[in-house]
Image: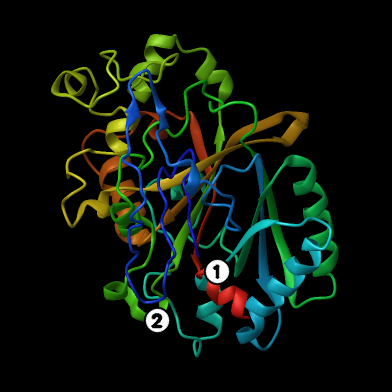
Amino acid sequence: MTVRSSDNCPSRIGPVPEASLVQRDSRQAPIVLFRRNPLKVVRDPALEADISNPFFGSRPESMCLLQLDFTGAQPSSILQSVAAMVRLLERSHTGLRWQVGLGPTLFDRFSALPRPRALKLLRVNGDAAFGLMPNSGQSDVIIAIGEEWRIIIDTARRLVNLLKDSDFRLRDVHIGYDALSDRDHSGFIDGTSNLQELTPEQFAACVFVQPEDDQPFAGGSYLVFRKYEEDLEMWNDLPERVQERFVGRRKKSGSFLNGSFDWTPEARKTTLANAHILCANPRETPPEHPDHWKGRVYRRGLKFTERGSEGLLRYGLLFLAVLRDPEVQFCRLHNERLLPDSGPKDSLLSSGYITPVCSACYYLPPTTHIERS
């Protein structure tokens, strides 16, 4: 699997050899953040390229997530079956970007399968209050496809038709978009701080399973998928200055509340303890520290709009985090920083603005494993 620079991943990671750490490319240009726009990163154009995995590389215009349950008797053929279906679709759309993930429920039913050590149902604070149980949004398999909107719709339709004659049952479909704007429904810039400042080695330590973690599954990643509904009526009724205090950034520029794009003591003083940027990224451990990866999350957020109950529209966010260890990086951060049992709670999660409606975790095999199947 080769990972190249993107809006969210500023530098090349790869190739990713099995059971080994990622080696740094000697041509890698230094990463420099533009002070006037913290989202842009200086990169070596020679390292720019599209790749097959929709979670890395250039951000796809839209993404389709198909959650499937396996109904067959031979789970060892799952990767081959999924790969065969998607390759049929590639005949119509060359260069389709896709990835497959395996859920913990699959390994619960087929205990003889070798299981990734960190693959478990997500247990996070606050979900039960909304009636969301650890297994309520979990499926055996997920297929993620990232492309332009027209191709996404056509590919999803074709894939659903192929499932009729397969060993899979469609559980749910989620389609999100990231086109036209880098702002989410709240009006704030999304992904302002998303590991852009890390070196290739530091980035790899955050998103790829390392040999010392779980040798048989090294080189892969874990996917945390959360679907949140947003109460835009409530949000839009808030004054902009209140929204900024909730988030911890200026709405128009994306800077910290003191006007700086650099995290300084002055920026920290103007940030509330329950601001989202501080709860989600404590900024306590420097990137050079060997345990830095434990407090960092690489994610992508996709907007969605659906028909809700009583003819109303539902708006929200498809939250996708690609991680080295979901328990260490996501669950611990969520339970200790975002919604702790005591102390300041994240303003966005605790205010009623967003509601979790789906939660799932998957292991993403290295693409080399899928290609060999």
Q: Nearer the viewer, residue 40 or 213?
A: 40
Please name the residue that numbered disc 2 is placed on: 216
**Mark 1 lies on residue:** 367
Amino acid carrying label 2: it is Pro
Amino acid at circle 1? Thr
Asked if 83 appears above or below 311 in the picture, the reply is below
Q: Which residue is drawn at 40% across and 20% down?
A: 254
Quarter of the image with the C terminus in it:
bottom right
Name the residue located 70 percent from the left edge and 53 percent from the top edge: 173
**Dot 1: what SS?**
helix
Q: Please identify, in this view, whether the residue under mark 2 or under mark 1 is nearer the observer.
A: 1
Q: Which of marks 2 and 1 is nearer the N terminus?
A: 2
Image coords of residue 130 (percent x, y)? 50, 44
Nearer to me, 42 or 345: 42
Residue 164 pos. (x, y %): 84, 70
Looking at the picture, how far across and down is residue 114, in whole percent? 46, 85
- x%, y% of residue 184? 54, 28
Q: In this view, does 124 lie to the left or right of 70?
A: left
In the image, taking residue 332 as reference, residue 318 lies left or right, namely right
